[in-house]
Image (cartoon, rainbow, N blue to C red):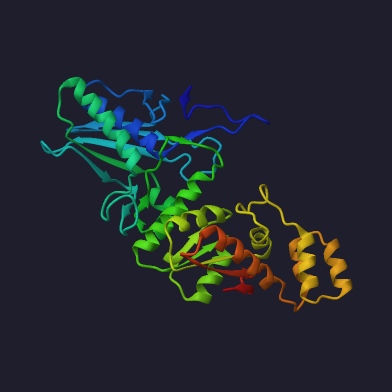
Amino acid sequence: MIAGMEEPRPEGRPLRRGWTTGACATAATRSALMALLGDGFEDPVTITLPGGQQPAFALAHETQGEGFAEAGIIKDAGDDPDVTHGALVTARIEPALPGAGIVFRAGEGVGTVTRPGLPLAVGEPAINPVPRRMMREVIEAACAARNLPPDFQVTISVRNGRELAEKTWNPRLGILGGLSILGTTGIVVPYSCAAWIASIQRGVDVARAMGLTHLVGATGDTSEKAALRRLGLPLEAAIDMGDFVGGLLKYVRRHPVEKLTIAGGFAKLTKLAQGAMDLHSARSTVDLGPLADLLAGLGADAETIAAAHRANTAKETLDLAGDLPLASAVAALARDQAQHMVGSATRIAILVTDRAGNIVGEAD
């Protein structure tokens, strides 16, 4: 089946995988190169992914002129809610100076690296190492078959990429002007946590490279803003960990900083306090019984404790607590869990926020 031509998913069908921007850029590169070398645009164009899969991609754009050829492919992210789904990824191939080798350029909608800490040097186009390798292999194989030196300039563009990038982590990571060309396997796994955890790791890398020693891992925008306000830290110190607190803690264990503050809502941090390292509602739940026991330990009266045992949600229990420091008691337990996970090299603090962004509990 040709990539990008699948039928809509019927009710009950398993989630469909898609293709990374790196795979699309590689396929576009191959088709444009074939045209530039005189063989015409390959359509559909087949490439080999790092895992050996050989998808075929239909062209959505092709043009050729004096000394260049350009091909474009519409990215199909499958059933993943990817911001780049439906974007046109274009590769323009031109001869480079003799001996220059393969040179990558950022076209319209592809960002440029402006901060250290990423796997690309500052000033380089945001085309990640595996997509670069895939494109090099395509070019080198075609040139070897024709006994030609692989001296070409490859310019990758993404239509509306500058606007799409504002919905990604790129501005925070110092990748300016557009999107990154990503992918390690060429395949997008729907609703995979891998891409999010990779973004968490790059966020830590960039913050460390900037010399920041105190980071904030937040479950969402509200808790992130509250923590940055309280701590007086720059945006670059904030890691949007979402529900993947375990992924952040494991990475910081291997790449420590002086201090890490975890910020989030009461229910999610109750899950952390109870030992959960994935805070998503589908993968962990709050055990309300221990919250009632915590209230008892804080001196709540019998009526409040009984009501807490009947509560349906963590928020309901927090509301029952009144002036009792239930949120801070949960924060202390969450801190202990996170500290055990991260090890002794990084000090953990916890901030608990309500839905309005007020800090209702903390442990340091």
Where 357 sits versus 85, above or below? below
> On the image, which quarter does residue 202 sit in?
bottom left
> In the image, residue 274 lies at what x, y percent?
68, 58
Residue in view at x 27 percent, y 56 percent: 122
Where 328 sits versus 221, above or below? below
Give 164 or 208, whichever is nearer the viewer: 208
> In the image, residue 229 lies at what x, y percent?
52, 75
Residue 67 in the figure: left or right of residue 316: left
Residue in view at x 24 percent, y 24 percent: 142
Residue in view at x 66 percent, y 62 percent: 273
Give 287 or 340, whichever is nearer the viewer: 340
Give 352 or 20, whichever is nearer the viewer: 352
Residue 335 in the figure: left or right of residue 207: right
Where 260 sits versus 323, above or below? above
> In the image, residue 101 lies at what x, y percent?
17, 37
> On the image, which quarter does residue 115 sit in?
bottom left
Residue in view at x 77 percent, y 76 percent: 322
Q: Residue furthest bottom?
A: 323
Can residue 190 be seen at all in this image of the molecule?
yes
Can residue 264 be seen at all in this image of the molecule?
no
Where 286 sits versus 69, above or below? below
